[in-house]
Amino acid sequence: MAICVQEAFKTIPDALGEVREAVDFCRYYAQQARDGLQPIELPGPTGERNVLRFDGRGVWATIAPWNFPLAIFLGQTVAALVAGNSVVAKPAPQTPRIAARAVELAHEAGVPKDALILLPGGPEVGAALTADRRVMGVAFTGSTATARKIARTLLEDDSRPIVPLIAETGGINAMIVDSTALPEQVVADVVTSAFRSAGQRCSALRVLLLQEEIAGTTIEMLKGAMDTLRLGDPADPATDVGPVIDQTAYDKLMAYRGRTDVVKTLDAPAEGLFVPPTLVHLDRIEDLTQEWFGPILHVATWPAGKLAETIAAVNAKGYGLTMGLHSRIARAAEETEALAQVGNLYVNRSMIGAVVGSQPFGGEGLSGTGPKAGGPHYLHRFVVERAVSIDTTSAGGNATLLSLDEGGI
């Protein structure tokens, strides 16, 4: 937790959540391997034995982001290991210390040192790793642009085997609120979803879509709730919002913020990379063309009776990570569930904090390839399936397989 606070600028509650999630990944994937990766006996004609077995692919490269430098780093890595692979694990260049400590603990726990190798470095190291023909699979969490580069690298060498890529990228995540929603609950969930972790979560709320009739009052309540947020040292238990990860992120976010129609912002400490939580007005959702990875929340309105059209406008962005809905109408929830093209839909709750095993996480479209991390299908992407069929009859005198004890060779 201390390294998460010092290196990734996580608040103490976020650091605690990070460690807990890392533990959850380890335990969950271990149990999934016991339950789901054992050989399966398949039906067949009498006298025939058919078995489907799962074997590791070889060497996997796992490339982790800085925003979850322990949980995602370790989750990807232990999934590959428990499926029977060796792993070269590359942390983000901003957060190598937490990764080094995690690998050190894994080795102390009994993971062979030659089965798990830490490879710190920047983009050039990641490029060399994914280009290496010995790498038989890549698990990556980060930007959509980098995921595209990795996909091209894996395919450009015609002599290389076709290997899998598991990519989890970002999203322009929307929360839709209708006039029946409970405003106090909406505001609390918006503040958590948009500003916790300084907005530096893939799942974070990026655009709030309010039904026109309730927009004014909800925005006023939201502005009041934002005033209660405390910015400061992430090691201080009273801090709600810490600094962003580095100077590059700070400069990019502050430059964008300066070009927007700011509805509400906060004062930030004079020293440090603090991007103040900011509420930005949009005329329409189409005006937001990319993800801004920080505590900047956009707000727009939608007319009553146009829920399906509003969801379609969100889908049209091409991303598909998270979406939220606040409504007390069951039909609205059912319609959103049917139409939303996202990996994770959250109804009447915050949009962050997916729980391993209960809320498998991952997107579609520009937001990822699947399968979903922390879900029952994740490990199968790390293995090859091999079917074996054996004729167990003695027809012809040669079909029976003998064990060594029975004189077989």
Image (cartoon, grey):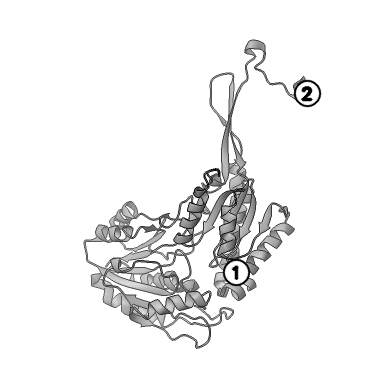
Residue at the image point whose x is 57% and y is 81% from the top? 236
Residue 323 placed where, x, y %?
38, 61
Q: Give whichever of 336, 122 is nearer the camera.
A: 122
Closer to viewer: mark 2 or mark 1: 1
For the view shown, which residue lies furthest in the top direction?
Answer: 396
| Residue for badge 2 | 405
Residue at the image point whose x is 29% and y is 71% from the top? 300
| Residue for badge 1 | 95
Q: At label 1, which amino acid type do we have?
A: Thr
| Position of 244 relative to 400 (above/below) | below
Residue at the image point whose x is 40% and y is 74% from the top? 296
- Identify the mark nearer the N-term, 2 or 1: 1
Q: Quadrant of residue 349?
A: bottom left
Can residue 233 be seen by looking at this rendering?
yes
| Position of 90 relative to 47 (above/below) | below
| Position of 388 relative to 217 (above/below) | above
Quarter of the figure with the N terminus: bottom right
Residue 335 placed where, x, y %?
29, 54
Q: At label 2, which amino acid type do we have?
A: Asp
Residue at the image point whose x is 67% and y is 55% from the top? 116
Neighbor class of circle 2 (other Cα within 10 Å; few <14, some 14-19, many 20+) is few
Residue 209 placed where, x, y %?
31, 68
Q: Quadrant of residue 407?
A: top right
Q: Give whichever of 340, 218 is nearer the camera.
A: 340
Quarter of the figure with the C terminus: top right
Can residue 30 be seen by looking at this rendering?
no
